[in-house]
Image: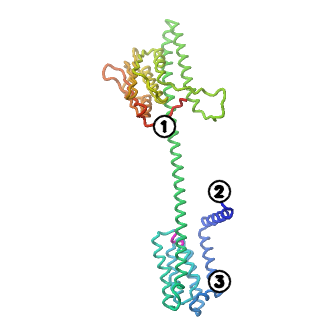
C-alpha cells in the first residue's frame, strides 16, 4: 500500500479534529454553525446582494430580516429534529417566492436536507422534497414571466446534491460501523477460541498426568507393601521389590520430564544442554513392557495380540496404551487379593479392538475419573469404550474399539494432539 498524499493526510487530520470537537460539544457546535449562517444571511440583506436575483425590489426590510432569520435559526434543531426544522422553514420559503425577494438564504435548507438523509429513514426524503420544492410554485405563479428553470433550478439542485451527499456519508458511516462491529465480534470469537483451546489443553494435560502418576504410584504402592511384607521372611524378595520401585519411579520421572518439557515455552534458536529429550510417547510396542511392570507389582497379566499392527499415528497408539494402562491400574488398586487380568488386542481391517478383563472383586459399578478419561481419549478418534462389571462371577471388563485410520475424521486436531515428537 502506498502512503497517502500529505494534503490528504492534513485534510483527514482536520476532519478528525472537527469531529472530535463536535462529539465533545454538540450544542456549542450547533450554535456556532447557526450563528455563522445567520450572519451570512443578514450580510446578504445588508449588502443588498439579494437584489441580483430578486423579482421584486420593493420588499420591506423587516420582512427581509424575518425571512433571513426564518431560514437560518431552525438550524439549531438540524440534528435532533431535522424534519421539524425543515417544516419551520416552509412558510418563509413560500413567502420568499410569493414576495419575489428570492433570498439566497433559502439555500440553507440544503443543510437540513443533508441531516435528514443522514439520520432519518430514506422515505423521509420524499416529504423533504415536497417541503423544499412546493413553496417554489408560489413564486412561479406570482411571477410567471420568469423562467421556470430559474425558479426551480437552484432549489432542485441544492436538494438533489445535499440529499446525495447525505446518503453517501450515511452509507460510508454504516459500512465503517459494520467493519468495527465485525472486528469486535472477531476479537470476541478469537478470545473465546483461545479460552476453549486453553481449557482443552488443561484437560489433556490433566489426563496425561493422571495416567502417568496414577499408574506408577499404584505400582510403587503395591510393590512397597509387598516388599515390606516379604522382607520379613525373604530379604532377597524385599531387595527385588526395592529395585522394581526404583525402576518404576525412574520411568515415571522420565515420562513426566518428557511431558513437562514439551510444554515449556522455548525459542527455536535456543538449544541448551539441559533441554529435555522429546522421545516418542508410549505406543503399541510398549504394551508388553507395561504388562511386565504390572506383573512385577504382583498382578498376574496375560497379554494376547492377534493380527499385525497397522501403521498408526502416535496419538492413536498412545490412546490404546493409556486405556490398557488405566484398566490395569484400576485392577491393581481395586481388584483385591488373588485378582488377575487378561489383555486381548486384536488388529483387524475394521479397526483396533482392545478388551481388558479381570477377576477382581473389590470394586462396585461406579465410574471414576480414570474411566471418564478413557472415554474422552476414545472419542478423540471416533472410538467407543465400554467399562462395566462382568455380569457373573465378579470382575470388570473394559472394551475399546478404534475405527481404521481411514475412517478417522481427519488428522489430529491441534488442540488434542499429544506431545509425542
What kind of element bears circle 1? loop
Q: Which mark is residue 413?
A: 1
State which region is magenta: 114-118
Does the magenta portion include 244? Answer: no
Q: Considering only order in the chain, which callout, 3 or 1, is on the residue closer to the N terminus?
A: 3
- Where residue 75 appears, as percent x and y from the top left, is 56, 76
Q: What type of secondary structure mainly makes up the magenta span?
A: helix
Alpha-carbon span between mark 2 and mark 3: 46 Å
**In the visual, does 269 lie left or right of 204?**
right
In the displayed structure, 119 sits above or below 249; it is: below
What kind of element bears circle 3? helix
In the displayed structure, 334 sits above or below 378; it is: above
**Label 3, residues with CA under 10 Å away: few <14, some 14-19, many ≥20:** some
**Label 2, residues with CA under 10 Å away: few <14, some 14-19, many ≥20:** few
Does the magenta portion include 115? Answer: yes
Q: Which residue is mark 3?
A: 43
Q: Which mark is residue 2?
A: 2
Amino acid at each position: 500500500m502506498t502512503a497517502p498524499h500529505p494534503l490528504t493526510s492534513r485534510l483527514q487530520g482536520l476532519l478528525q479534529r472537527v469531529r472530535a470537537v463536535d462529539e465533545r460539544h454538540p450544542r456549542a457546535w450547533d450554535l456556532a454553525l447557526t450563528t455563522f449562517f445567520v450572519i451570512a444571511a443578514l450580510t446578504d440583506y445588508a449588502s443588498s446582494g439579494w437584489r441580483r436575483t430578486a423579482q421584486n425590489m420593493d420588499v420591506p426590510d423587516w420582512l427581509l430580516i424575518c425571512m433571513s432569520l426564518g431560514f437560518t435559526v431552525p438550524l439549531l434543531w438540524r440534528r435532533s429534529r431535522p424534519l421539524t426544522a425543515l417544516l419551520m422553514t416552509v412558510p418563509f420559503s413560500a413567502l420568499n417566492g410569493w414576495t419575489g425577494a428570492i433570498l439566497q438564504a433559502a439555500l440553507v435548507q440544503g443543510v437540513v436536507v443533508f441531516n435528514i438523509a443522514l439520520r432519518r429513514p430514506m422515505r423521509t426524503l420524499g416529504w423533504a422534497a415536497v417541503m423544499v420544492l412546493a413553496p417554489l410554485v408560489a413564486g412561479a405563479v406570482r411571477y410567471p414571466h420568469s423562467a421556470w428553470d430559474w425558479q426551480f433550478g437552484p432549489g432542485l439542485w441544492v436538494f438533489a446534491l445535499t440529499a446525495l451527499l447525505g446518503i453517501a456519508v450515511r452509507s460510508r458511516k454504516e459500512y465503517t460501523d459494520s467493519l468495527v462491529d465485525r472486528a469486535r465480534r472477531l476479537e470476541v470469537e478469537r478470545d473465546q477460541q483461545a479460552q476453549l483451546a486453553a481449557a482443552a489443553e488443561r484437560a489433556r494435560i490433566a489426563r496425561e498426568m493422571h495416567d502417568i502418576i496414577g499408574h506408577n504410584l499404584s505400582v510403587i504402592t503395591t510393590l512397597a507393601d509387598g516388599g515390606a511384607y516379604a522382607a520379613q521372611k525373604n530379604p532377597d524378595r524385599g531387595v527385588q521389590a526395592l529395585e522394581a520401585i526404583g525402576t518404576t519411579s525412574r520411568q515415571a520421572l522420565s515420562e513426566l520430564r518428557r511431558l513437562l518439557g514439551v510444554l515449556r515455552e522455548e525459542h527455536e534458536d535456543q538449544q541448551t544442554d539441559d533441554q529435555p529429550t522429546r522421545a516418542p510417547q508410549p505406543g503399541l510396542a510398549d504394551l508388553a513392557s507395561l504388562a511386565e511392570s504390572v506383573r512385577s507389582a504382583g498382578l498376574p497379566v496375560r497379554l494376547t495380540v492377534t493380527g499385525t499392527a497397522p501403521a498408526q499415528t502416535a496419538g492413536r497408539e498412545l490412546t490404546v496404551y493409556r486405556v490398557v494402562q488405566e484398566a490395569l491400574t484400576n485392577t491393581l488398586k481395586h481388584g483385591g487379593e488373588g485378582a488377575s487380568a487378561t489383555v486381548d488386542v486384536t488388529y483387524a481391517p475394521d479397526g483396533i479392538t482392545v478388551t481388558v478383563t479381570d477377576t477382581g472383586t473389590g470394586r462396585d459399578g461406579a465410574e471414576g475419573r480414570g474411566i471418564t478419561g478413557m472415554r474422552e481419549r476414545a472419542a478423540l478418534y471416533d472410538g467407543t469404550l465400554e467399562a462395566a462389571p462382568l455380569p457373573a462371577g465378579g470382575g470388570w471388563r473394559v472394551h475399546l474399539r478404534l475405527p481404521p485410520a481411514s475412517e478417522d475424521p481427519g488428522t489430529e486436531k491441534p488442540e488434542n494432539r499429544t506431545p509425542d515428537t
